[in-house]
Image: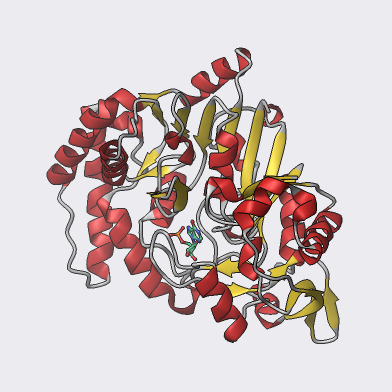
């Protein structure tokens, strides 16, 4: 494994944190390349639960470098709090590198997130309210404040003096009683700069040297393929490129440096926030999956919408990401169900769609076409994980092999529970 990207094939929350943590053992460097603290990873080690939002999950492995790439939007206050939290639990952040080119989430981005969501009405995506979209908007509009600006006080002051009056004017236009103060933010952010300075570096140079030295690099995706700003169900997406190609742009490496792409497929589908969800279950089965799968947002605590596995979206993710292997997660959650359904296509009027339509209305109105699998019973999954693939219930193997056949990609990792020990390599 010289370079691998781990990507979500659905709407995020596929269990990437656990999969990343598992493969991080074999990597020298773990890199996040997009998103911000809208993401949430829960990792359980020896009954200890770690919730991370911005720091890559590799931080929990000693002697690994973990990198926050230029493609992220970083809330420095949140990053510092997260560093403090993990250090209190005995994990050092000394091996963390923060890209000097990453954009910073500013207080006005969070306020703008709330305002824009309100103004968008039914086009609101149900964001995490962390300021992600407005920060990426400012990056693209070239209003952004980058990490390197924290070390050039004159430029920082100049940029804030240009941006903040514009933001204040927008808030005032919409009768928001919000007024951001240039000096206050200037001093606050210079302070963050001081505290973060020891982590800041040129990620592209660091990764290039690492590749030259033959080191293994793991790129940890956040969110999922269908939340991608270009390829997801726009406008119900996040604001970054969550697909594998984003790893190149968001960390400053050439695309040829990516050798493997692992797609994480949750055995069913979940979605948090607004947007089309053809296989959503608003019934007892959906409730069963939500409760058993503990499908509540790591970042916002919101109950996740749950539904059957949708192979139309998983196959789309295969195409978008050049997947070379799969990790299939949370299969244990489906145990106890007599029947398990999988969507193979969408029906819309007299049309059958085998590929995702771009038109969001069509997608909202589409009905799933299902095939049905026989279920399997609850087992001691930790024990079975140690016994190997052949000891899995036959119906579960049929389900796994169907996913492999439909995507044409082998499953490498099977996850049967939240712990490291509930994992099986096929
Ligand atoms: P934002 O990324 O906060 O702007 O939110 C945009 C959409 O992406 C909303 O529907 C969020 O619920 C969703 N979203 C953002 N981050 C995650 C994640 O880590 N997992 C699942 N959904 C997410």
Q: Nearer the viewer, residue 319 or 424?
A: 424
Residue 281 position, x and y percent, is 62, 81
- Residue 339 in sight here: yes
Does residue 323 appear anywhere in the picture?
A: no
Lateral position of residue 196 relative to residue 10, left or right: left
Residue 340: image location, x then y, percent: 73, 75
Q: Residue at x 61, y 34 (%)?
A: 248
Name the residue nearer the viewer: 405 or 235. 405
Q: Farthest residue to the top: give it.
A: 213
User: Residue 199's image quarter?
Assistant: top left
In the displayed structure, 82 sits above or below 402; it is: above
Residue 267 in percent (x, y) is at 67, 63
Q: In this picture, is 122 found above or below 311?
A: below
**Image quarter in which the C terminus is found:** top right
The residue located at (54%, 62%) in the rendering is 237
> At 24% from the left edge and 42% from the top edge, which residue is drawn?
160
Indicate the quadrant containing the N terminus: top left, top right, bottom left or bottom right.
Answer: top right
For residue 345, side relative to residue 101 (left or right): right
Seen from the viewer's position, the closer of residues 425 and 263 is 425
């Amino acid at each position: 494994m010289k370079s691998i990207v781990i990507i979500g094939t659905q709407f995020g929350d596929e269990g990437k944190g656990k999969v990343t943590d598992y493969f991080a053992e074999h990597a020298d460097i773990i890199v996040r390349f997009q998103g911000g603290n809208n993401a949430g990873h829960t990792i359980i080690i020896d009954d200890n639960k770690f919730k991370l939002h911005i720091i890559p999950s590799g931080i929990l492995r000693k002697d690994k470098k973990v990198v926050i790439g230029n493609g992220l939007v970083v809330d420095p206050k949140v990053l510092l709090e997260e560093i403090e939290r993990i250090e209190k639990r005995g994990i050092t952040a000394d091996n963390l590198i923060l890209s000097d080119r990453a954009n910073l989430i500013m207080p006005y981005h969070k306020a703008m997130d709330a305002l824009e969501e309100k103004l968008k009405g039914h086009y609101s995506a149900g964001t995490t309210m962390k300021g992600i979209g407005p920060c990426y908007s400012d990056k693209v509009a070239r209003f952004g404040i980058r990490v390197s600006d924290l070390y050039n006080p004159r430029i920082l002051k100049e940029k804030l003096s240009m941006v903040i009056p514009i933001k204040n004017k927008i808030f005032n236009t919409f009768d928001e009683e919000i007024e951001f103060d240039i000096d206050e933010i200037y001093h606050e952010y210079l302070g963050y700069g001081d505290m973060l300075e020891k982590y800041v570096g040129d990620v592209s140079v660091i990764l290039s040297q690492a590749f030259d030295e033959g080191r293994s690099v793991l790129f940890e995706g956040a969110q999922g393929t269908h939340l991608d700003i270009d390829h997801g169900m726009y406008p119900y997406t996040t604001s970054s490129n969550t697909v594998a190609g984003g790893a190149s742009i968001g960390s400053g490496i050439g695309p040829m440096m990516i050798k493997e792409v692992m797609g994480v497929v949750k055995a069913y589908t979940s979605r948090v926030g607004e947007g089309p969800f053809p296989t959503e279950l608003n019934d007892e089965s959906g409730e069963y999956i939500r409760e058993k799968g503990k499908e509540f947002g790591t970042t916002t605590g919101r109950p996740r919408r749950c539904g059957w596995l949708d192979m139309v979206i998983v196959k789309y993710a295969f195409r978008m990401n050049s997947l070379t292997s799969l990790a299939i997660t949370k299969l244990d959650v489906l145990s106890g169900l007599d029947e398990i359904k999988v969507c193979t296509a969408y029906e819309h009027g007299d049309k059958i769609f085998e590929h995702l339509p771009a038109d969001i209305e069509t997608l909202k109105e589409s009905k799933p076409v299902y095939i049905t699998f026989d279920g399997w019973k609850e087992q001691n999954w930790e024990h079975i994980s140690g016994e190997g693939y052949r000891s899995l219930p036959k119906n579960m193997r049929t389900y796994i092999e169907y996913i492999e056949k439909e995507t044409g990609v082998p499953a490498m990792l099977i996850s049967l529970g939240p712990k490291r020990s509930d994992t099986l390599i096929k």
